[in-house]
Image (cartoon, rainbow, N blue to C red):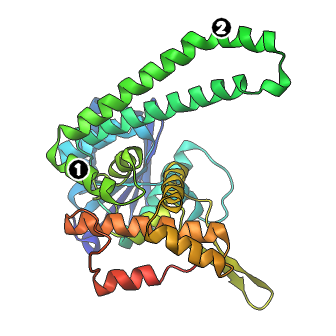
Amino acid sequence: MTNIEKVTHYIGIDISKKTLDIAIYKQNSFLFHEQINNTPTSLKTFFKSLNKRGVDLSQSIVCAEFTGVYTQFLINSAQLLNLNLWLENGNHIKKSQGLKRGKNDKVDAQRIAQFAYKNKDDYKAYQEPRALVKTLKELINRRKQLVSLKKQLSGALGEKEYKNEEDLALLKSLCENTLNGLETDLKRIEREIDRLIKSDEKMFNQYKIINSVVGMGPVTAANMIMMTNEFSAFLEAKKFACYAGVVPFSYTSGSSVSSKAKVSKMANHQMKTLLHMAAMSCIRSEGNLREYYLRKTEEGKNKMSVINAIRNKLILRVFACIRDNRFYDKDYKYSTKLMQNEMAIHC
């Protein structure tokens, strides 16, 4: 990572499927804008041309929104040319800019460059996931799509009270092959996810550690590995809990605005759902988290607040076990710091 104090140029890139709009800033002063094709050749030619324009790439930060597959050519070029690449969540960039009027690709590139300059102290070099993690992500996304399709189709067929028996029987016979096909493909994808994880020692070790935590299952474990980039993108449990939308925030202002702490809607809803299912599993099974739930609800605590606290506890336990490279043990003596973190979770 380059010394942030020595950075001279900030390069903002607005990414679309076919083109890239690039704005170059020297500190907070706009130098020029250029639009190029979103291809490896165009990127290589452009970055090499910057040296002739007085832009030292070794002392520059290249910032862009992460836009999925359309970002891949930029990532590849950054690795090839050893660029200081910063990929940021688009919502974060947008909300950090305050009230803005007007929008086009050129303006967006300039705003991204300004964001990089103003938030340079938060710069975090992009870490490319291993090929295995990328494949895992693709499989998880396909599984998610198939589960959604199956749920939609099964749900429509399950509305018995709104259909007569003859129509329902007809619909079921017409959709039977589709549902069977979805179920077959789901099982194939799940087997492939299992095979992929078990093929790699590091990934399989993390997978087993997560599954050792009571309440956590195979699907949640695979998603956590993928979303955390094998626990390299999130080093702290609290940051991941915030990302998953299970951290309550208070809203107060003077003496007139005061509400109970609530979780934010800005979250990864897929992970939040998986953690909720894990928490519900803990509540239904014998163990200290079920005892915790019963004790807190008997004290009059809101049920959803207690469930959210359990989601937090599950994240803390997973991260502690990953950090120490050990399986979960309910009788394990936590470090003082971890005990303080668990005690800090309020309902």
- The amino acid type, in three-letter code, at marker 1 is Asn
Label ID, residue 284: none
Left or right of 322? Residue 108 is right
Residue displayed at 40% across by 54% down: 216
Query: 151 above or below 10?
Result: above
- Residue 228 position, x and y percent, is 35, 55
Q: Quadrant of the N terminus?
A: bottom left
Residue displayed at 24% across by 68% down: 323
Given the current orientation, which residue lies at the most extreme left position?
Answer: 201
- Residue 49 position, x and y percent, is 26, 43
The image quarter containing residue 212 is bottom left
Left or right of 227? Residue 255 is right
- Residue 340 position, x and y percent, is 39, 86
Write down the residue under mark 2.
174
First in residue order: circle 2 vs circle 1: 1
Q: Is residue 29 visible?
A: no
- Between label 2 and label 1, give the one nearer the viewer: 2
- Residue 178 position, x and y percent, is 56, 14
Asked whether 117 or 327 is in front, the reply is 327
Left or right of 309? Residue 333 is left
- The amino acid type, in three-letter code, at marker 2 is Leu
Asked whether 85 or 104 is in front, the reply is 85
Element at badge 2?
Answer: helix
Crowdedness of circle 1 by 10 Å Cα count: few (<14), some, many (20+)? few
Crowdedness of circle 2 by 10 Å Cα count: few (<14), some, many (20+)? few
Element at badge 1?
Answer: helix
Write down the residue under mark 1.
51
Query: 159 above or below 245?
Result: above
Q: Quadrant of the C terminus?
A: bottom right
Query: 251 above or below 314?
Result: below
